[in-house]
Amino acid sequence: THMLRKIVSDLEREAAGILTPKALREAATLPLAVHLEEYIADLDTRGRDWEYIRHVEARIKIISNDCGWKRLGDISADSFQAWRSKKAASPKTLNEYLNAAIAFLNWLIIQERISVNPLAKVGKVEGRGRETFQRRALNVQECQRLLQVSGSHQLFYLIALTTGLRRGEINGLRWHDVEVNGQNHFLRVRASTTKNHQSATIALRPELVELLKVSKLNTQDHSEL
């Protein structure tokens, strides 16, 4: 039939490189927002940290909106670099935007929705000597002042200061991860909440143990901290 001959012809032309594969042609017609939504869903399915997913989604949306990317064919290195040259942000932040976009585009290649990454050859912004502020650890007095004025966030800050856990890892803690009874006091950090996807057990300092006990007594919901 005519339809069968067309299918065979298209397959032959695809194999010869004359015609773009059907999967790429179909992907090109979909709004970029559809691809992004499916990418975010895949990250969630693979157990990536929710905070990481939120930042990735926000950065890609900002880039696509500012650059006018509506479909995959709109994405280009030139438009990204023009946007980046006008974006008021630190080199570190600009590189995070680039990393998010490249990871998304690499996923599209794996999914056979594009054949090449348009941003693959875009270089990172040099950050050395251009830091907007110097990072340093808080000294003892600064830690004490922070805890004194932290109010309802005191538990969060004390966990951060005494365990070294990141914000996303602390947000992922649940009361069943906390052991403050008996002689051994510790946190169980689940692999699903850590950046390196490895579980860990962290011993607790006495002041944190006492605050956790008080917080648990005053908390009706014994699931989240």
Image (cartoon, grey):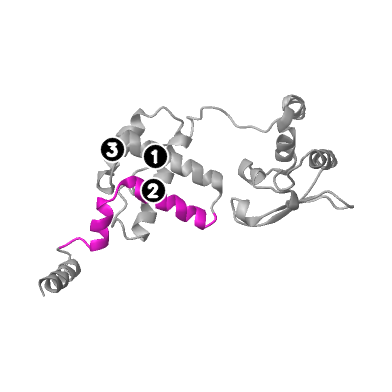
**Image quadrant in which the C terminus is located:** top right
Q: Main secondary structure of the magenta part?
A: helix
Q: Nearer the viewer, mark 3 or mark 1?
A: 1
Q: Residue at x 86, y 50 (%)?
A: 181
Amino acid carrying mark 1 in the image: Lys
Q: Nearer the viewer, mark 3 or mark 2?
A: 2
- Categorize mark 3 by other alpha carbons within 10 Å: few (<14), some (14-19), many (20+): some
Question: Residue 217: x, y in percent?
Answer: 82, 41
Amino acid carrying mark 3 in the image: Ser
Is the C-beta separation of discs 1 and 2 under 8 Å? yes
35 in magenta: yes
In the rendered image, which residue does mark 3 sit on? Answer: 79
Q: Is residue 19 left or right of residue 32?
A: left
Secondary structure beneath disc 3? helix
39 in magenta: yes
Q: Quadrant of residue 124?
A: top left
Q: Residue at x 71, y 32 (%)?
A: 153
In the rendered image, which residue does mark 1 sit on? Answer: 61
Q: Is residue 100 left or right of residue 52?
A: left
In the rendered image, which residue does mark 2 sit on? Answer: 36
Q: Is residue 127 visible?
A: no
Which mark sits nearer the N-terminus, 3 or 2? 2
Q: Which residue range is magenta in the image?
A: 19-47
Secondary structure beneath disc 1? helix
- Categorize mark 2 by other alpha carbons within 10 Å: few (<14), some (14-19), many (20+): some
